[in-house]
Structures are given as structure tokens and as C-alpha cells.
Image (cartoon, helix red, strand yellow):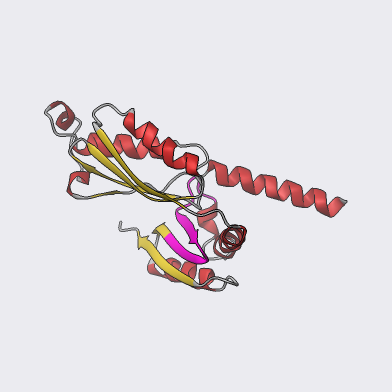
Amino acid sequence: MRKSAKLVIAVMLCSLALAASAPSARASGPASKRKSRDDQTSGRPGGYLVRAVRHQLLMLPYYSVFDNIEFSVDGYRVTLSGEVVRPTLKSDAENVVKRIEGVERVVNKIKVLPASFNDDRIRHATYRAIYRHPVLNRYALQSVPPIHIIVDNGNVTLVGVVANEMDKNVAYVQANSVPEVFSVTNRLRVEKD
């Protein structure tokens, strides 16, 4: 009885930690270059829209390290892409971006990952393998854990930003050590100072 109570508490704490994490939204494309806020009033959305979209995506509830939403801004059109576990997260992302002043059109190319008990097990095992490793556990302490774990039919993709090449390689090795993982794609980027 005592062991099951500890397990329930541990699962609840893990769920709260995952719910508190935020997306690794990344701007891409030529329109993502930083421009002043004055660009919005002169007819060019530039940096204002990039910052506003990033902010709204970071504020999405229920976004976890098991989701990845990326975006690009082209004029007044925002294209969303990436992968999410919950179908509601796809529609929530589109809805919050549509409400941003200056956005005229949202193209939603976010993929909803298939529901799978095995993929869920791999997600949690990969999370533990990465964030419990002594080299990488400092990332788990951040309010927005930067290493996102995308699992699609047993195939793992690591997305996000790490401090150095060693952390990138350790995360890849740790993900490869999880049983029943078919392949691991390492799309982690090294943060440039």
C-alpha cells in the first residue's frame, strides 16, 4: 500500500512538471530576422510578429517536452509545424496565433502523433534516460526544459537547444539506450553565445 501511494505521488509530480513546461517554438525563414517594433506600423511585420507568436506558443497550457511546435512568418502569414501528442494542442496553437494583431492567415501543418501505449512508454523512458543523466540533469531544472522528445511509432526525434556538442551527443546516446526504440534522430542545436 505504501509503495503504491509513493508511485501515485511520483506520477502526479511528473505530470505537473510536464504540464509546466513550454514549447520550443522556433522561428525560421527570412522574415524571422529581428526588426524594430516600428516595422509593424510601416507595413512590415518583422520581429514584432515573431516575438508575439513565440510568446503565445510559450504560454500554451498542456505543452510538454513531448511536443514540438515550430513556426515561420512570411509577411502577415504564420505557418505552424511540428508534432504534438494532444489534438487539442494543435487547434489551441492555431487559435492563439489567429488572435495576434497583424496576423492575417495561419497555416496549420502541425502533426498529431498517433495514440500508442508503447510510444507513451518510450516517451517516459527516454525522458528519464536523458534528464536523469548527470551531464544533462541541469536542463530538467529549467522552467522550460530545452530538450523535447518526439516519439512517433517507436522512432525518437530529439529537438531543442543544448549548451555544447557533448550535451548533444550524450542526449543522443541516452535516447539510443532506451529499449524498443527503433531509431533516434538528433535535431538538437548547440546554443551559440
Viewer-nearest residue: 85 or 137: 85
Query: Residue 74 in the image: x percent, y percent?
Result: 19, 42
Residue 136 in the figure: left or right of residue 42: right
Q: Residue at x 38, y 32 (%)?
A: 96
Residue 46 in the figure: left or right of residue 109: left
Query: Residue 48 in the image: x percent, y percent?
Result: 24, 34
Residue 161 seen by the camera? yes
Magenta run includes residue 143: yes
Q: Residue at x 48, y 65 (%)?
A: 156
* Farthest residue, direction right: 1
Viewer-nearest residue: 109 or 75: 109
Magenta run includes residue 127: no
Vertically, is 167 above or below 32? Answer: below
Viewer-nearest residue: 169 or 117: 117
Quarter of image, res 41: top left
Q: Which residues are magenta?
A: 141-158
Query: Residue 120 in the image: x percent, y percent?
Result: 59, 57
Residue 58 seen by the camera? no
Q: Residue at x 18, y 29 (%)?
A: 40
Pick the quarter of the image with the C terminus: bottom left
Quarter of image, res 97: top left
Query: Residue 14 in the image: x percent, y percent?
Result: 64, 49
Residue 124 in the figure: left or right of residue 147: right
* Farthest residue, direction left: 42
Quarter of image, res 190: bottom left
